Amino acid sequence: MPSLPESVASTLLSIGAVSLNPQHPYTWASGLKSPVYCDNRLLMGYPEKRETIIQGFQDLMKANSIKPDLIAGTATAGIPHASWLAHQVKLPMVYVRSKAKEHGRKNQIEGSIEAGQSAVIIEDLISTGKSSIAAVRAVVEAGAKVDAVLAIFSYGFDLAADAFESASVPHFVLTTFDTLLQVAIKEGRLAPDDLETLQSWRADPQAWSDTFSKK
């Protein structure tokens, strides 16, 4: 029987939420060339598969003795998953923008946070960790304590691990890049010869991107 990380990895691959294309890389918003692209918004269209994700989040919370008063989703991709989780565990929810609005009440956080509440922040994806830490700071500034950041998928960059350690915030993910590669090979979605290419990219995305762009 597959483990939770393997099941989630298989789910993401099966619906194309994570795509691997070493020969024809994608271009991220930053301009970086990458042989992998993640879009967990696709889970919105698959009720049974997103139930696996929400149950996975509950399992992570139980395994790590996390008992929050509040679920916070990051805008925009974390919002649906936070909403489904909050509904399932019967907790209030807020969502956190990357920055405050420039009009109206100029809120960065939508919803109600009470001073002293404990919160869990839901992310769809962790890359550098910067956006997660920004959300943590916003929630803390609003008066709450952040117990942890939970995410569906992480590339496993050292930069992200360092960011969470520096902020003294635990983070837990349902599946990782390494697990996803193992599952992709097992399911015949990735040629063994491409494994080294993907591992090389993860070791130094910028150098890999620069080298590919010169071809």
Image: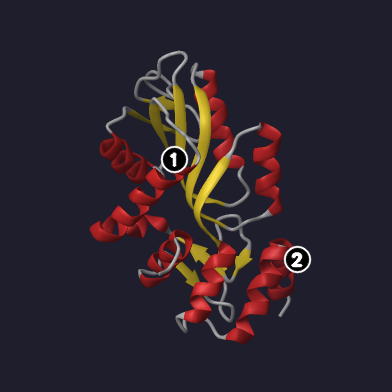
Task: Say left or right for 69 vs 129.
Answer: left
In-front residue for pair 114/66? 66
* Residue 61, numbered label: 1
The colour scheme used to paint the residues is secondary structure
Measured Cα–Cα span from mark 2 to mark 1: 36 Å
Q: Which percent across, then down, holds residue 125?
A: 50, 51
Q: Residue tagged by mark 2?
A: 207
Relative height, residue 22 to residue 66 (above, below): below
Q: Is residue 34 visible?
A: yes
Amino acid under disc 2? Ala
Instruction: Categorize mark 1 by other alpha carbons within 10 Å: few (<14), some (14-19), many (20+).
Output: some
Q: Tag 2: Cα neighbours inside 10 Å, few (<14), some, or many (≥20)?
A: some
Quarter of the view holding residue 170: top right
Q: Residue at x 30, y 60 (%)?
A: 49
Which label's residue is closer to the chain start, 2 or 1? 1
Tally the numbered discs: 2
Observer-nearest of 123 and 31: 123
Q: Quadrant of residue 35?
A: bottom right
- For badge 1, the amino acid type reads Met
Observer able to see residue 46: no
Give the residue drawn at x 42%, y 61%: 8
Give the vertical position of 183 relative to 60 (above or below): below
Left or right of 180 on screen, residue 85: left
Nearer the observer: mark 2 or 1; the answer is 1
In this view, 2 is above or below 152: below
Viewer-closest of 58 and 167: 58
Q: Is residue 149 left or right of residue 195?
A: left
